[in-house]
Image (cartoon, rainbow, N blue to C red):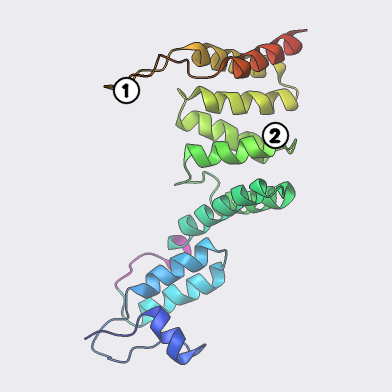
Amino acid sequence: TRNFTYDEWTSYFGETPYDRVCNTLPPHPSLIEAAREKAKSGEITEAISILKLAKRLGDTLKADPEKYIIPFAVKGYVKRSIQLLYNNKANEAIDLFTKAKKLDPILNGVTAFQLNEFAWHAAIRNRVNNVVMDAANRAVNLQPDDAGYRDTRGLIRALTGNYAGAIEDFENFVEWGREIKPRSPGSVSPPRPNRDDDVIEKRENWIKELKA
């Protein structure tokens, strides 16, 4: 015996607020998941309302609903901002990423890959500002040994006039790019560098131009 799931309730009763059918049992755990999904899609007010309702009906969630929902909202904003960049909607993407930072300035839980993906795709569309620069810096700080993230930051530094910083990042990328990849056990493929020659050559040309 259990109470309705959130989806079952909305299917049967539409917009009628969720309630327990069996008052001796707690609300279904799917209410918490529904709140998370609402937060990820940017429906923060609705997400908080669902959590408050769940607690009122006997859910054991101990966290403050408004604080609990923030990480899910932040991750949703960041994911959608990257998707907007893929679709060449850079201004909308940066606005959405800025919303994520307002909710959580340190972007806790956002991965270095996501930060770099946002920063790189904003930079190659020549949309760089403090928000984009901060994303690139955070990616490097999270994974300082990843030269690909240094490469992204180098591009943004170059676009914002920090030529010395850009040269440093590009030189780091070139050095790493020439290194031979460790071969997988049993691999019969010939050894290859981390990056192809054309990519390295492009960065070397950028370095020459920045030093000129």
Please give the name of the residue rendered at 55% of the width and 51% of the height, measured from the top-left corner. Answer: 79
Q: Quadrant of the C terminus?
A: top right
Q: Which of the two residues, 178 or 209, is positioned nearer the viewer here?
A: 178
Rendered location of residue 7, percent (x, y): 42, 79
- Left/right placement of residue 81 relative to residue 5 reads right
Any magenta on residue 62?
A: yes
Q: Nearer the viewer, residue 52 or 166?
A: 166
Q: Quadrant of the N terminus?
A: bottom left
Mark 2 or 1, which is nearer the eye? Answer: 1
Q: State whether residue 182 is above or below residue 55.
A: above
Residue position marked by numbered label 1 in the rendering: 184
Q: Which residue is denoted by mark 2 in the rendering?
A: 124
Q: Residue furthest left?
A: 1
Give SS at disc 2: loop
Pinpoint residue 120: horizontal percent, then vertical percent. Answer: 62, 35
Q: In terms of secondary structure, what is the magenta stretch mainly?
A: loop
From this view, report whether residue 51 is shown above or below residue 4: above
Of residues 162 and 190, the one nearer the viewer is: 190
Circles 2 and 1: CB distance less than 8 Å?
Answer: no
Under mark 2, the amino acid is: Ile
Q: Which segment did they paint magenta? A: 60-67
Binning the other alpha carbons within 10 Å of mark 2 as few (below 14), some (14 to 19) or many (20 upward) gives: few
User: Which mark is drawn over residue 134?
Assistant: none
Specify the quadrant of the image occupied by residue 211.
top right
Give the side of residue 209 with respect to residue 37, left or right.
right
| Residue found at x 74% / y 27% | 159
Is 69 contained in the magenta span?
no
Nearest to N terminus: mark 2 or mark 1: 2
Name the amino acid type tagged 1.
Ser
Camera-side residue of 212 and 134 = 212
